[in-house]
Image (tube, rainbow, N blue to C red):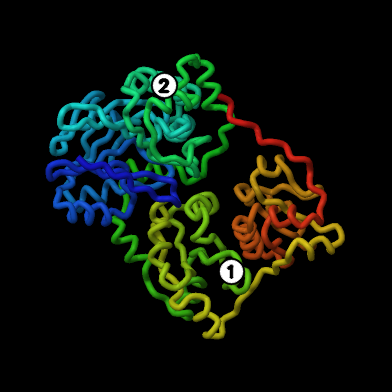
Amino acid sequence: MKVEQIYTGCLAQGAYYISSKGEAAIIDPLREVQPYIDRAARDGVTIKYIFETHFHADFVSGHVDLAAKTGAQIVLGPTDAHLGYDAHIAKDGEQFKIGDAIIKVLHTPGHTLESAVYLLMDGAGKETAIFTGDTLFIGDVGRPDLAQKIVGDLTKEKLAGLLYDSLRNKIMPLPDELIVYPAHGAGSACGKNMSRETSDTLGHQKKVNYALNAELTREQFITAVTDGLTEPPQYFPKNVMMNIEGYDSINEVLERGNRELDPDAFEEAANHTGAIMLDTRAPGDFAKAFIPNSINIGIDGSFAVWVGTLIPDLKQEILIVADEGREEEVVTRLARVGYDYAIGYLKGGIEAWKKAGKETDHIESIDPEALAAVPQPHILDVRKESEYQAEHIEGAENMPLDYINNHIADIDRSKPVYVHCAGGYRSMIFSSILKARGFDHVIDIQGGFKAIKDSGKFTITDFVCPTAVKK
């Protein structure tokens, strides 16, 4: 029997490949499914089952495509959702054979109503691992406020209570030596306080994970898991619906997005469609020269989260500017979170645009020393409120990138604004949006808050330790 975790860092997501005696199962596959098919072919095994731990909110799963391409059966936990595809709705305790191995379904409502974990047993019937989805993370549990966006009469408190019961009745009685394989690690918005570790023994988690503290009462648990939850990204419920209803094949999405457009064709598309021009280059490269009205969200940062936060319509047409050779990667990563309507990319990138004599814009960027020489600058700190409260430049205004659309009307267009985040990624997104909205006096502060603080040129508020998660 073979178990492999296939971890994707940009989504902090773990998919799983299990094989035994010529058969395989995939748990929580990503949207692009060819790597799983190739892996099974190399091992000479047939993918028999595709297990989904729940209807994911933070990414579009590959279950529909993988089933269509392999004939494998999709298995879901108990649900009455109206699916747009064929699937086996498992009963609590139902077992599935993969070669000599057995996977047992444990229904664990709480993160969502249909959430299930999958208990793996070897050929001798020994329980060896548990695939916990978003029910149990390393160091945390799944947030209980996402399903309420889909089912109207639910509350986060009601779901938290269900989660408490699921953990106590289904997971905590299991053997300590089981390996816990969750769907996410640190960096995912599906929990509050996840560890950077991506697996652990259940016994160790019983000792260190606050949610598995046997002395925690139901009321204390509900308070602990619901306290401090921030609003989830707006694309989460939309991804859930795609995972329930189905979606276009990834092949169609890639074909639509991987269209080469020369500068004239790119400009024509930008002028005669409603497409957003999304420039995915590094912030520093974008600042030097970009197509007017394009938005920068760098592919080498928290790309999916910021696309999902700032582009409200999953069906928004998108024109891509990327570093040469990375165009398909951009289309794929957009599709992972449900943005299926990329309609082409600029062939040759920004250099081709400039060689064609097309207009470019730029964003002025200054270092902290130069900023210190500006009398009474209007500084916008676009970090999260918690980061700002921990410490900030005295007199700086907090305007988190997450909520830019709510506050952009409050910015004085007639005066220069100096923008910073922690290191420069978010501030360039923010600055590019301001420029696209017609703000002419936008200056990015190089190196972000760290460089500002290290310069010693500014008065910084006293550090306040961010409020710890209540445990």
Residue 154, position as x, y percentages in the image: 45, 26
Residue 15, position as x, y percentages in the image: 33, 44
Dot 1 lies on which element?
helix
Residue 73 shows up from this direction: no
Mark number displayed over residue 286: 1
Mark 2 vs mark 1, CA separation in Å: 47 Å
Q: What's the residue at 51%, 21% (across, down)? A: 222
**Where does the C terminus fall, quadrant-wise?**
top right
Dot 2 lies on which element?
helix
Say which amino acid is labelled 2: Leu
Of 148 and 453, which appears nearest the observer? Answer: 453
State which quadrant residue 136 falls in: top left
Residue 115, position as x, y percentages in the image: 35, 31
Q: How busy is the neighbourhood of tag 1: few (under 14 within 10 Å), some, or many (20 plus)?
A: many
Which residue is under mark 2? Answer: 162
**Left or right relative to 201: residue 433:** right
**Left or right relative to 271: residue 371:** right
